[in-house]
Amino acid sequence: MNQQVLVAGAGPVGMTLALALRRQGALVRIIDKAGARTDKSKALVIWPRTLELLDILGCAQVFIEAGVRASGARILGEGRELVHVHFSRARSTYPFALMIPQSETERLLEQLLAADGVQVERQVELLSFTDDGQRVTAQLRHADGSLETAAAAWLAACDGAHSTVRHALNLPFEGDTLESDWVLADVQIDGELPNDELTICWMPEGVLACFPIGERRFRVIADVGPAPEVTPPPPTLAQVQALLDRRGPQGLRAHDAVWLNHFRINERKVRDYRHGRVFLAGDAAHVHSPAGGQGMNTGMQDAFNLAWKLALVQRGQAAPGLLDSYSIERSATGIQVLRNAGNMTRVALLHNPLLRELRDLAASTLGRLPAIQQRMVDQLTELDLHYAHSPLSMSLHGTSVQPAAGARAPDVALCAADGSATRLHALLRGGKFVVLSVGVAPPGITPALKSLACAASTDAAEDYEGGHHYLVRPDGYLALGTRGDDASPIVDWLQRLL
């Protein structure tokens, strides 16, 4: 049987999935009906959790060198600062927001894929497919009009908000389209606007946000009233300047527009991300408010979650039932991210004077508390996302609660089984589980499990409780922890995976 994964859609999510699959030794083919990568900035930020996952793939530094580090975010209310959070609070190797246009993200991903021997097949359109329970058979159309029948073991739909695959499966895209119309402008801005921070302005007539892209280029978005029935023409630079004058810090001047557009906010999601041998990821499965800039990041994290599971099943190292956990885990995450982004949008769009006054008072008072600031940073950076309720997460009585089963497993310096110095992320790079022993001798890995897991140890680690063993998944989340005197639950867990 052809064990190949066919990835439909070569945006950031599809290429992340293809790259993760390839680097874990899986067979992958990626197609896209577009003739070229996007030339628009679109999604602008890569958050620390996504950078950590890119580090597991061994390529985070490539993106960091191409982007701009943002150190924090501030919210202004009618000219005065209400909240100022610093991303240095992020408990990560990457305590910053990486500002990088989606066009650059796609360029780098395509280069990384090509270096690994995978070419994005452009102007290849997925027309239809069938899933007979044993394989997926896809009908493809090439640029010259020729048709191809392609067989694959699995189909991954990364083909965006208007997904051909989702429509073919007749899946409801449940949610809402907000009534407001928004302006988007990528422009150069002169004036007192920090180029290493996100600036959000809450004003009586609406919200305005400025996101740094590089040097003095910024993304400006603002709500401009109810959406008309007919899509309006792109805004003019003069209209963008008027918004900056009314809502932004004083003295800003916009010029040299790169991209001007209108958009509406959709908040939608499919219920299940898996249908037989077909998986949905990214915008094909969920679309979000741009508040928080988490849509692309959430989609890329879908890809990381799916990749290691498909790779293990493709190699025959895990039973196919493992793939059921993808929808369970990522659908729950999608709900959480949708809720958070939607709440941020609705708070920013309050028009009732009394509610605005209460909002600003709460933000300026509570937003100064260290615990609230930490929670805001954890949410924005997606470091708080977890799989505590996943069937793959096992909580045992009397074991460590920090980190708990399902939580992110922070990177840490380790000693590998051969005595060499390494890091957790480096060990995860091969697509294996890591049995991490903190302050206790590592358990032996049986020959039957050595292709699935490796052992490593450290005398002490800040983010882990001493005297425990931890089983870390290939995507850097904790499956379970055990006391140092009994590693048998970890062995049992891995054997059940087989």
Image: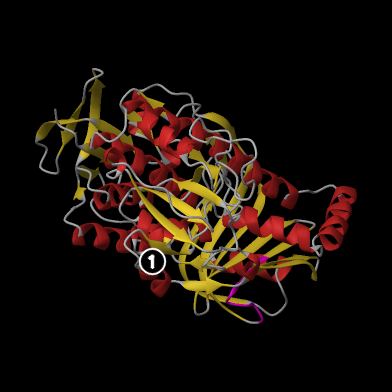
Query: Does the magenta segment cover residue 196?
Result: yes
The magenta-colored residue range is 192-199
Q: Secondary structure at mark 1?
A: strand
The residue at the point 86 percent across, 48 percent down is 355
What's under tag 1, amino acid-wise?
A: Thr
Query: What residue lies at 14% left-to-right and 44% top-to-bottom?
Result: 143
Is 117 left, or right, of 250 in this rendering?
left
Res 137 seen here: yes
Is 469 situated left or right of 450 in this image?
Answer: right
Q: Residue at x 14, y 40 (%)?
A: 142
Asked whether, in this view, residue 129 is left or right of residue 230, the answer is: left
| Residue 364 x/y as whole percent | 84, 63
Which residue is label 1 attached to?
A: 422
Position of the C terminus, as image quadrant, is top left
Location of residue 58 with respect to 34 vertically, above or below: below
Q: Residue at x 69, y 57 (%)?
A: 376
| 384 or 474, nearer to the observer | 474
